[in-house]
Amino acid sequence: MSLFEDTNPRALKDLLSEIHNRTTVLPDFQRDFVWEPSATQELIVSIASNYPAGSILRVRDAKRMFAAREFEGAPPLDGANHTFLVLDGQQRLTSLYQAFYGVGEHRYFLSLDKLIEGADFEETIFYVRATTKWARAHEDFTLQAKELLLPLSVLKGGAGGFSDWFLKVARQLPDKERIVLEDALLGIQNKWINVIDNYHFPVVTLSDKTEPDALCTIFETLNRTGVKLSVFELLTARFWPQNIKLRELWEKALNDYPVIADFAVDPYYVLQGISLASRKASSCKRSDVLNMAASDISAWWEKVVCGLATGLEILRDDCKVMLPKWMPYQTMLPPLAAVLARAGSPKTAEAGAHREKLKRWFWCAVFGQVYESAANSKAAKDVVEVLQWLSDGDLPESVASFGFDPRVLRDVTPRQRAIYRGAICLILGSGARDFHTQAVITGKLMTEEGIDDHHIFPGAYLGDAVPARQRDCVLNRTLIDRTTNQMIGARAPSDYLADIRSTSGFPFDEVLDSHGLPIGADSPLLCDDYQAFLELRQERMWQEIRRVTGATVPADLEVDDKALERGTAG
């Protein structure tokens, strides 16, 4: 008996509709959705380009072999009868469902005016956090029409949804302008929208006769395999006949510059750095990297590798990005390496001046979320502008236009990785000390003592009285060792801190202050006042953000405080 019911392609829009209708669900043992929005954006670009994006494996679940749950963001099951369980493809399907149905933590848009001007699709798609005022404002069709910004959620209705949207936009214009716009948008529909509308995933459907033990074996195998051929491997093969052995160059780079190995850098970022450094018009899109000449590698490999190592040392030593897991944006590494490769290493105090500017650029990009979308385009722009700045030119746009609303810190959870990780690095930069040994926390100590980010007011202590996002926000997090975290459990801060404070000779106030936590007899930690604690820690963290970015006043970018307190911001 065959396990396979069929192996037919299925339209993406049909697969997403089945998720929305709860015909297709997940086995409850599947891990949570973990993709970053940048990965979703890359997947949408692949789909719009009609590139293969893997296959989907599902089983017809007539036997109800496992507990089931809905996809994240989809309507709750509430007893609905499903047909299929997805075994492989959860992350891709969840990300696409959230993007095309306008749910989840981010909203995705297409800049149609840029597409009309001939820009690449990957340069016109972007995402914003759903909690921002900008996102809320752009729920209004009038503003979408004025700025020619298409919410991707329009496309859940397929090409027909796009046609309805753009005809409604065009009707607002005089006849002559209307015809020109309609023709331009029809061109976009034919080139891009229809491709998305007609996109099919290969879907393997296992029959309802498949036994549970077979499904478990299949699932375990899927989670151990699935390595795709990388650009680095493709270029390794291409340049081999020209006596450029990329694999050997990479191994030498790891040996010569251990910091690169410490941060587990993808060698593709070196290739992107070379593409940025070697071209008159900086660019590092995949096609640019694939089209590099052997001479580019010969001329720039060592300079870019050295620049990468220097950049990582700056981030580790000055910005306190001590471990790979706390790197806010991996995609900032190629422009950082390219800038340092092009700028060289001055033997004067100018090197220190460069270092200060690079640090400010890094922090502005992190807290300004510059690399959340169109990272390759941002990298190319920053290489040019940062190099000019290092030569006493104008501020880069990413620095000059920086704005930050400290209220967003109440809404930043580990899922908003860049700002969250940046905030943790700022805590480390304040000289955060271990609650167990009171030693200053280093990367080595974090590894040895099991120091990680944990709640200050335990989630179990706060309970449902505080919305989940506010319980988990970065203001309620700091770096705590394994031993102390086990001691904290679900206890109130006043309770567990009393134990720490009673330890003879322990510098209680100094350790708390090193984490940016309020101290003194009136500290809200000692009376378990969560809202007062959030106020004080928000102000303390905002002071640190101002210090590293050069910001002077807060921007008004986010939803109002009441929405955050209600937990309705997301």
Image (cartoon, rainbow, N blue to C red):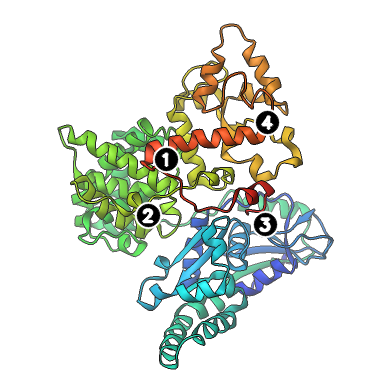
Residue tagged by mark 1? 264
Sequence-wise first label, 1 or 3:
3
Residue 231, percent from left and from top: 38, 57
Q: Residue at x 42, y 68 (%)?
A: 124
Front position among marks 4 and 3? 4
Residue 511, percent from left and from top: 53, 19
The quadrant in which the C terminus is found is bottom right
Q: Is residue 517 above or below residue 464?
A: above
Q: Dot 4 lies on which element?
A: loop
**Residue 285 falls in which quadrant of the image?**
bottom left
Q: Dot 3 lies on which element?
A: loop
Q: Give me the C-alpha separation between circle 4 and circle 1.
A: 41 Å
Residue tagged by mark 4? 529
Q: Is residue 209 visible?
A: yes
Mark 3–mark 2 CB contact (< 8 Å): no
Front position among marks 2 and 1? 1
Q: Amino acid at mark 2?
A: Glu
Q: Dot 1 lies on which element?
A: loop
Q: Which mark is residue 419?
A: none
Residue 525, percent from left and from top: 64, 26
Mark 1–mark 3 CB contact (< 8 Å): no
Q: Residue at x 75, y 41 (%)?
A: 465
Q: Give me the C-alpha separation between circle 4 and circle 3.
A: 32 Å
Residue 425, percent from left and from top: 46, 35
Q: Which mark is residue 233?
A: 2
